[in-house]
Image (spheres, helix red, strand yellow):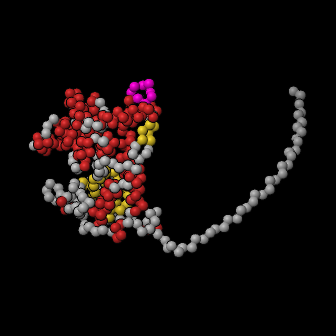
């Protein structure tokens, strides 16, 4: 449980659907890329496949049914993204998302999924062929996953290696996007106003001074969405990366900020319960000095700064030579006399 010190909020920012966005870019799937470029909702788009209806019909459904359909769509997107079979998908959907599919529904949904996102299967086939030939795969960041088990005589071991060939580059790069943002923030942001606490899967957890909350959320969001991929790796994703924001008094109660934007200050007064009471009190927002950027070494904090004119005393160490090795004195020979006594 992350509980910030007095005067701070804890904030959690995670990459929204990072794996789907990276896979869309790797597969160059036009449908997925269009959805993300237009800031659409891919779970709603997939829900139409699951339900077999149009968007107009979907919007007419009760809110509870739309929510259930989106949950089913999440299991479909993250299950079939890496080529899962329909039998394994039934178990995956039940255990991971708590939703049920019949065999016929799972078969129909799988066919509809790969029909809608038509470039995914071709990407799977290319990746498997590359892994079979080279025994490794490489992510956008250049990291390699060795896969010697693609030559296994055991079918299930070979299939697992092929599954890893598809998902490893995606999951690695999704995690690396967060790590890149952390490294850049650590060098540039003053921990007096924003402290990096942890990194969980694809989410960054930070402590932000309460009066700088809006600035802090926008700062972390900006770093997560603007990694210099072209400069560092010579590549760019074909769709935008988006970070979702939330904050609270501790990590067990995070208030998600729907519609949070870099272009304007969020209306924190709109965070209310069903009775209209404020969920959390947020003070008047400000921007820290120098926009919160470091003006000193990133390896010091305000409490351990020292004057730059400190004279560092050099301690001289005398090298003592070891004493001469003493000569060994030959041991005296001891003559033992054995006396036998008569019985």
Please provide percent x and percent y for residue 330.
86, 46
Please provide percent x and percent y for residue 194.
35, 62
Residue at x-position 23% and y-position 31%: 111
Please provide percent x and percent y for residue 80.
28, 35
Q: Nearer the viewer, residue 99 or 72?
A: 72
Please, is residue 213 above or below residue 238 in the view?
below
Please provide percent x and percent y for residue 234.
40, 50
Residue 223 lies within the magenta run = no
Residue, far bottom: 309
Quarter of the picture holding the C terminus: top right
Residue 155 lies within the magenta run = yes
Q: Quadrant of residue 90?
A: top left
Q: Is residue 283 left or right of residue 201?
A: left
- Magenta stretch prevailing secondary structure: helix
Residue at x-position 41% and y-position 34%: 131
Residue at x-position 24% and y-position 42%: 31
Magenta segment boundaries in residue numbering: 150-158
């Amino acid at each position: 449980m992350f509980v910030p010190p007095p005067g701070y909020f804890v904030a959690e920012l995670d990459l929204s659907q990072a794996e789907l966005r990276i896979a869309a870019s790797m597969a160059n799937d036009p449908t997925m890329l269009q959805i993300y470029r237009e800031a659409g909702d891919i779970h709603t788009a997939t829900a139409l496949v699951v339900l077999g209806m149009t968007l107009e019909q979907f919007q007419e459904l009760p809110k509870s049914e739309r929510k259930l359909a989106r949950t089913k769509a999440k299991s479909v997107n993250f299950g079939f993204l890496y080529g899962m079979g329909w039998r394994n998908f039934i178990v995956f959907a039940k255990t991971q998302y708590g939703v049920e599919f019949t065999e016929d529904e799972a078969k129909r949904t799988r066919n509809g999924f790969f029909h809608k996102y038509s470039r995914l299967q071709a990407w799977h086939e290319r990746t498997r062929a590359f892994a079979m030939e080279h025994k490794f795969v490489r992510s956008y960041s250049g990291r390699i996953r060795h896969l010697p088990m693609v030559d296994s005589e055991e079918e299930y071991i070979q299939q697992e290696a092929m599954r890893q060939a598809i998902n490893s580059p995606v999951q690695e790069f999704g995690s690396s996007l967060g790590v890149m943002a952390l490294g850049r923030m650590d060098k540039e942001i003053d921990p007096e106003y924003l402290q990096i606490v942890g990194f969980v899967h694809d989410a960054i957890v930070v402590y932000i001074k309460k009066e700088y909350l809006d600035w802090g959320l926008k700062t972390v969001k900006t770093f997560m969405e603007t990694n210099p991929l072209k400069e560092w790796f010579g590549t760019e994703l074909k769709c935008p990366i988006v970070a979702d924001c939330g904050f609270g008094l501790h990590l067990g109660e995070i208030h998600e900020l729907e519609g949070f934007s870099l272009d304007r200050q969020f209306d924190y007064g709109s965070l209310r319960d069903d009775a209209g009471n404020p969920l959390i009190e947020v003070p008047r927002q400000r921007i820290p000095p120098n926009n919160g950027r470091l003006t000193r070494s990133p390896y010091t904090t305000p409490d351990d700064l020292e004057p730059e004119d400190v004279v560092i005393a050099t301690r001289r160490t005398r090298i003592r030579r070891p004493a001469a090795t003493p000569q060994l004195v030959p041991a005296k020979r001891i003559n033992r006399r054995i006396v036998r006594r008569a019985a």
